[in-house]
Amino acid sequence: VVSLRLALSNPTLPEITDGYEIQLHHSMGHDLPLYLREDHFAGAHELRRPLGGDRKRALRLLPSVLQELRDKIDFVRHGEEGALGPGGARHPKSLASIVAADYLVQIKADLELRGGAVFQSDSAVALHKDLWMRGYMGFLNDEELRRLVGNRIEIARRQGWHVCEYGSLEWRNLARGLCISSYEVLARQDERSRNILDGKPDHPLLQKGIARVLRTKRAPARILTFDHIIDAEIKYRSMGRDPRRLAAYTVEKFRRHAQEFAIFRNSDNALTVTAKEAILWRHQLLSTRSLANSTVKQKIQNIKTILNWARYHEPGIVFPHGNPLAGVRPPQSIRQPSHLRTYTLAEATTILRAARLEKEPIFRWIPFLCAYSGMRIGEAAFLKKEDFFQHLDRWYWEVSTNGGRSLKTASSQRRIPVHQALIAEGFMDFVFSVKKGPLFYRKYSKAHRIRPSLATWVRSLIPYLHRPNLRPNHGWRHLFEDLCRRDQMNEDARAYILGRSVGGSRELYGRSDIMLPGLAAAMDQVRPFEIGEQ
């Protein structure tokens, strides 16, 4: 905001005398670090320049003086004194600032490692102390420095902190500074191993950089944790006469991903999240190559969703300018063909035979239920005895949201005929043996463990190395779809039994008991698995 005002003599600002002045209120108070404002603008949030007592002359000088002030702000913001490189870096930092940031990241990683977290990097942990000393004393050539700290120099470049060219004097100075960082980290690790927890860096470069970092950090006026946002969304989703609640396993997934992100950024205050943090987190997750791109994509998307919930709960107050992660691109992946995620008939038969030998109900019956219905594991895990009912001479079970249960979609509510093979297997006898309530758990909290437990059990029969793309839980759903196609089940009946949405207004009509015998006849078209005698 620019204003031209008539100023009277001000004893606190001796350069201002009677006459006109330009007053520039700039956003530098928010996006310019405090130490830069102190160094270049005496901490001010606005700039003033006298334009003399003649109004016409003041108006004539206004554009050039305004440009001069803006140029100075841009120079300070983008060309910080001591910034590395000849210019062109998006977010230039001084040598001291880069080295301090690297030091603090390694210290944080050491704390996580001691707390049991998994951490992989080329940091000081794996290298000998003398090597870092030789590096910062300048006894290593460019190639040796590149092997030692080249990866960290490249990360800093991608963050826009410098544009140093390999082999240049600035590049070598940065490499030596990172050696100083790692040397000091080793010293802190040694101190912590001897229960000395208050060690500080000795090197002046690090002391200067850390002092700047601490000066620029300002405590937020408010803290809103990820868990608080998720709790508020759970409460909102449970309101009303017929709410659609968040599934328990969905809540667990959101909490887990939010916790991982909070550990990475060393803060669970959602109000301070930045796009840069999400980008660095994405880069770290992808760099390990232990997670599929689709998994990393889901983690990023879940954090975006949590921040959107915060905006919806307090519109115009929390993130009034939009979700801070709106511009963060998720990683792309090649969608694997469906048949690679699906059980083969031989694999399904192997699992069902193994299930017959199990005494634990979740391993004994859930594979059979999913094999003969295509149910999601999460749906089967929460089945109760009261969900089973008889119509005419046939048994069915209902998949619903009764009792506070949640489903993936509205079309997931359905009634499924009990396949004759399940009755022959003795499944209904098991249902009758349950007195009341859940079939597969006594405590509600244990129901969330069924999905991972089943996946682990299946992988003991079909190792990951043999079928890396197989979906141990969701593979039953794919297989049942194929069985329905093989045995020419009507497409409408197939979609209804699987709980899939086919679109159109017809989903809003009918679905009464009248259709149940026809649905049972369609289920009988699916031929049983050839497992052999029990």
Image: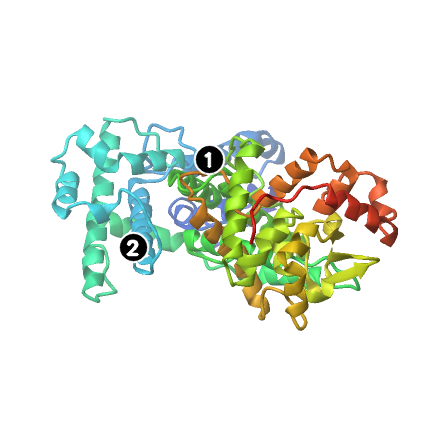
Is residue 420 shown above or below 504?
below
**Element assignment for label 1:** helix
**Quarter of the image containing the C terminus?**
bottom right
When asked about the image quadrant of residue 145, the answer is top left
Query: Label 1 sits on what residue type?
Result: Asp
When asked about the image quadrant of residue 318, the answer is bottom right
Q: Which mark is residue 74?
A: 1
Query: Label 2 sits on what residue type?
Result: Asp
Q: Residue at x 52, y 33 (%)?
A: 332
Residue 183: x and y, percent?
19, 48
Q: Residue at x 33, y 36 (%)?
A: 83
Q: Is residue 46 visible?
A: no
From the image, tell me which residue sits under label 2: 110
Between 215 and 133, the one lying in front of the other is 133
Q: Residue 16 carries which label?
A: none
Residue 514: x and y, percent?
88, 51
Please state which of the two labelled residues, at mark 2 or mark 1, is closer to the viewer: 2
Residue 114: x and y, percent?
30, 59
Residue 257: x and y, percent?
50, 52
Give yes or no for contact between labels 2 and 1 (Cβ–Cβ under 8 Å): no
Q: Outermost residue toward the bottom?
A: 435
Marks 2/1: CA distance? Answer: 37 Å
Number of residues whose C-alpha sits closer than 10 Å to that of mark 2, classed few (under 14), some (14–19) or many (20 or more): many
Q: Residue at x 29, y 40 (%)?
A: 95
Q: Can residue 152 be seen in this view?
A: yes
